[in-house]
Image (cartoon, rainbow, N blue to C red):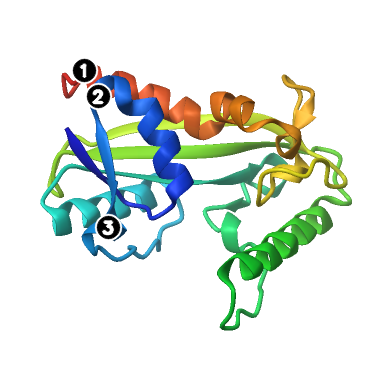
Amino acid sequence: MRLVLASNNAKKLAELQALLAPAGVALVTQGSLGIPEADEPHATFIENALVKARQAARLSGCPAMADDSGLCVDALGGAPGVVSAHFAAVAWVAGEREVQRAVQDAANSRLLLERLAPLADRRAHFIATLVALRSADDPEPLIAVGRWQGEILREPSGSGGFGYDPLMFIPALGASVAALGAEVKNAHSHRAIAARQMLGLLRDVWHLG
C-alpha cells in the first residue's frame, strides 16, 4: 500500500519507511505530490497529527500518515510540548535554513535550561504520535504513541543529533541522545517505538503485510 507521509523530512521518511516496510507500506512525501504543509493550531500532538494526515489524504486522494513530536518536561507541566521546535522567540531572517534552525535550537535549549535552573525535578520524555488514515473522512484513525524517558542535563553533552538531543540524558543507555550512534538512536527513539506500534496496527486493523 502507498501511504502519503505528511512531511518533507528525508530522514523521517527513510526511518519510517524502514520500520514499516514489513507491512508492505511504501511511503511518499506530500511535497513530492505538491501538497503544502498543514497548519498545526492545536495544543495536543494527536490533534496536530490528525490535521496533517487529513490534509494529506484529502489532497492526494490516498491513505496518509503523519506524526507530531516534541519534548515534554514534567516540572514544566509538559512544556515545551507541541511548540518544542519554536519554544524560544527568535527573529528569523531570509537565509540558509539550516543555519537558522541551529540558531533556533540553541535558543530553545537556553530557555529550557533557564526555566529548569531553580528546579530539582528534571524528568522529561520525547514523544512521537503517529496517525494513519485510509481517507480524509476515516472514522477510525490508527494512532500510535511512543515515549522515550530521560532527564534534562544541566549542560549539553554529545555532538550528534539536533534540537534538544544534547540536553536529553537517557539513563537506560547511560548517555545523552546526542552521544548515541544513529543506529542506537533509531532503535530506541520515541519515533521508533511509535512506528513499531503502528506496524502492529497496520497488520491487525488494516490487514497489511
Residue on which the image places disc 3: 32
Residue at 64% across / 47% down in the picture? 77
> Percent from the top left, x then y, of residue 147?
55, 31
- Residue type at mark 3 is Ser
Rendering coords of residue 113 (x, y %): 81, 53
> Label 2 belongs to which residue?
202
Q: Residue at x 14, y 46 (%)?
A: 62
- Mark pair 1, 3: CA separation: 25 Å
Q: Quadrant of the C terminus?
A: top left
Nearer to us in this view, 206 or 116: 206
Closest to the observer, 128 or 72 = 128
Q: Is residue 202 left or right of residue 79?
A: left
In the picture of the structure, the residue carrying the numbered disc 1 is: 209
Whole-angstrom CA distance, mark 1 to mark 2, is 8 Å
Circle 1 — which element? loop
Badge 2 amino acid: Leu
Q: Residues within 10 Å of mark 3 (few under 14, many from 20)?
A: few
Q: Residues within 10 Å of mark 1 (few under 14, many from 20)?
A: some
Measured as percent of width and height from the top left, residue 11 is found at 48, 45
